[in-house]
Image (cartoon, grey):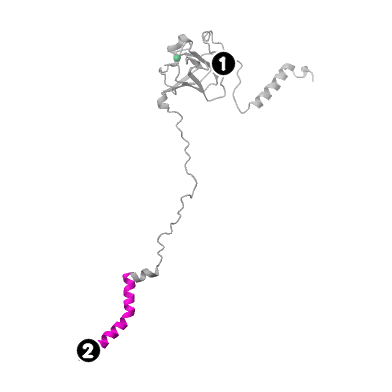
Amino acid sequence: MEPSDTPGLSRRDLFRVGVGATAAAATATAASPTYAQETFEYEGWFDDVDSFDGTVDMTGEDEVTVNVGAGAAGLAFDPPAIHVDPGTTVVFEWTGEGGGHNVAERETGERYESERTGEGGSRFDITFDSDGISKYICMPHVANGMKGAVAVGSGEGAPELTVGEMVAGSEAGGDGGGEGEGGGSDGESEGEGEGEGGTSIDPLSVLSSPFGLSAVIALLSPLVVAVLMRREESGEE
Ligand SMILES: [Cu+2]
């Protein structure tokens, strides 16, 4: 086969098609779109952010978590930069470290600004509906480099977004246990039958009972009657 047999496709192109097909097969279950751009340009946004170490790929998830109050001093977002698919909900979750924080969009708009809290377990949800980059800060600690960004899809433009509720840690109340193994083994409490009430008859008790005594008397009564009759016959005259 010469390359000329397939006009428009060089050998290099054919190779890439082959590799692409293999990769697609290997990741078929993830069903996540592949983006041409995996490195995003934040235009100096992270220059003063020590914890920034590139964009963390979180594509292929419906919901992802960014910790609020990370790092040694609790003055960072972790990870500070993430890449998600359109439609993904980013859950900002407070660690309880570093004092009071919030999450407020800056530079790409000011469309969200959560309450400030230091309470661990608090959460604030934002769903990013379309492609773009959204940059945000923690207002009390922006001078400490507490900044972050969410790159959605291609990362071009500003993403459409839906701001969710802020839930305080005390209201979130952990995981709530749940599950609860109901049931247990069936039939365990099946009646054992105490065997009570099986009235046993004690022969001696018959004599001691009123009924038993009268029965004895009844047996003896013919003799008594006979004796009395004799007396009558002999006595009275
Ligand atoms: Cu902060």
Is 147 left, or right, of 40 in this rendering?
left
Q: Nearer the viewer, residue 62 or 216?
A: 216
Q: Residue at x 42, y 24 (%)?
A: 169
Pick the front one: 45 or 146: 146
Q: Position of residue 190 (x, y in %)?
A: 46, 52
CA gap between label 2 and label 1 equals: 134 Å
Is residue 204 in sight in this rendering?
yes
**Three-letter code, disc 1:** Thr
In the rendered structure, which segment of residues is drawn in magenta?
A: 209-233
User: Of 214 and 4, which appears nearest the observer?
Assistant: 214
- Which residue shows up at 42% across the image and 12% down it? 140
Instruction: Indicate the quadrant containing the C terminus: top left, top right, bottom left or bottom right.
Output: bottom left
Residue 226 is one of the magenta-drawn residues: yes
> Which mark is in front, 2 or 1?
2
Of mark 2 and mark 1, the one earlier in the sequence is 1
Residue assigned mark 2: 235
- In the image, ligand 1 is in what quadrant? top left
| Residue furthest left in the image | 237
Mark 2 lies on a secondary structure that is: helix
Q: Quadrant of the N terminus?
A: top right
Circle number at residue 55: 1
Which amino acid, by three-letter code, is at mark 2? Gly
Place of residue 156 in the rendered image (x, y in percent of width and height, measured from the top left)? 55, 14
Q: Is the magenta stretch mostly helix, strand or loop?
A: helix
Residue 8 vertical placement versus 209 (above, below)? above
State yes or no: Cβ of the residue under disc 1 lies below 8 Å from any atom of ligand 1.
Answer: no
